[in-house]
C-alpha cells in the first residue's frame, strides 16, 4: 500500500484561486472542464460519495512552472482534499511488491 500524505486540512484552509497560478490562455477553463466532465468528479455533499470518487491528475514539467499552484487551485475549485504521493512512495512500493512476488517469479521461470 502506498503511503499517502493527507493534507486535507491544509488544502481546505489555504484556498488558492485560478488567478494565482500563471496559466496559458484557455488552460484554466480547460482544466475546470476536464475536472467537471470526469465521471468520478461528481460534486456531492455526501462524505461517502466523496470518498468513493476520485480523480488522479499527473502534471509534468520543469521546476517553477506553477504545477503546485495549479493543483491547489483545482482542489479549491472542487472543494476536495489533496493527497500527495511522491516518487519515493512509488519506488518503495515497487521494491516491496517485487520482494513479495520474487518467489513467484523464480518458480514461474522453471
Image: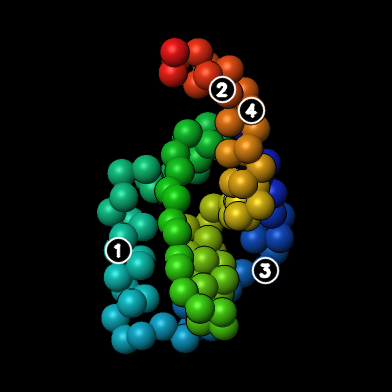
Mark 3 residue crowding within 10 angstroms, few (<14) / some (14–19) / many (20+): few
Determine the residue positioned at 63% across, 37% down: 95
Of mark 3 and mark 1, the one earlier in the sequence is 3
Residue located beneath label 3 in the image: 14
Determine the residue positioned at 52% across, 66% down: 71
Residue 29 location, quadrant: bottom left
Residue 37, placed above or below residue 28: above
In the rendered structure, find residue 101 and report the number of the disc placed on it: 2
The answer to whether mark 4 and mark 3 are in CB contact below 8 A is no
Q: Nearer the viewer, residue 103 or 73?
A: 103
Give the structural element (helix, strand or loop) at label 3: loop
Residue located beneath label 1 in the image: 33
State the image coordinates of residue 28 (x, y, percent, origin top left). 37, 76
Determine the residue positioned at 43% across, 56% down: 57
Spatial CA distance of label 1 from label 4 is 41 Å
State the image coordinates of residue 101 (x, y, percent, origin top left). 56, 22
The answer to whether mark 3 and mark 1 are in CB contact below 8 A is no
Mark 2 residue crowding within 10 angstroms, few (<14) / some (14–19) / many (20+): few
In the rendered structure, find residue 99 and report the number of the disc placed on it: 4
Spatial CA distance of label 3 from label 1 is 23 Å
Mark 1 residue crowding within 10 angstroms, few (<14) / some (14–19) / many (20+): few
Which image quarter holds the N terminus? top right
Give the structural element (helix, strand or loop) at label 4: helix
Closer to us: mark 4 or mark 3? 4
Residue 50, placed above or below residue 22: above
Spatial CA distance of label 2 from label 4 is 5 Å
The answer to whether mark 3 and mark 2 are in CB contact below 8 A is no
Which image quarter holds the C terminus? top left
| 75 sits left or right of 11 in the view | left
The answer to whether mark 2 and mark 4 are in CB contact below 8 A is yes
Of mark 2 and mark 1, the one earlier in the sequence is 1
Amino acid at each position: 500500500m502506498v503511503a499517502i500524505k493527507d493534507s486535507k486540512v491544509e488544502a481546505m484552509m489555504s484556498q488558492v484561486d485560478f488567478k494565482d497560478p500563471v496559466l496559458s490562455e484557455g488552460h484554466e477553463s480547460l482544466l475546470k472542464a476536464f475536472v467537471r466532465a470526469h465521471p468520478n468528479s461528481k460534486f456531492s455533499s455526501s462524505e461517502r460519495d466523496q470518498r468513493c470518487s476520485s480523480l488522479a491528475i499527473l502534471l509534468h514539467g520543469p521546476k517553477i512552472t506553477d504545477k503546485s499552484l495549479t493543483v491547489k487551485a483545482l482542489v479549491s475549485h472542487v472543494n476536495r482534499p489533496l493527497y500527495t504521493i511522491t516518487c519515493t512512495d512509488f519506488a518503495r512500493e515497487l521494491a516491496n511488491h517485487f520482494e513479495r512476488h520474487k518467489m513467484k517469479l523464480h518458480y514461474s521461470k522453471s
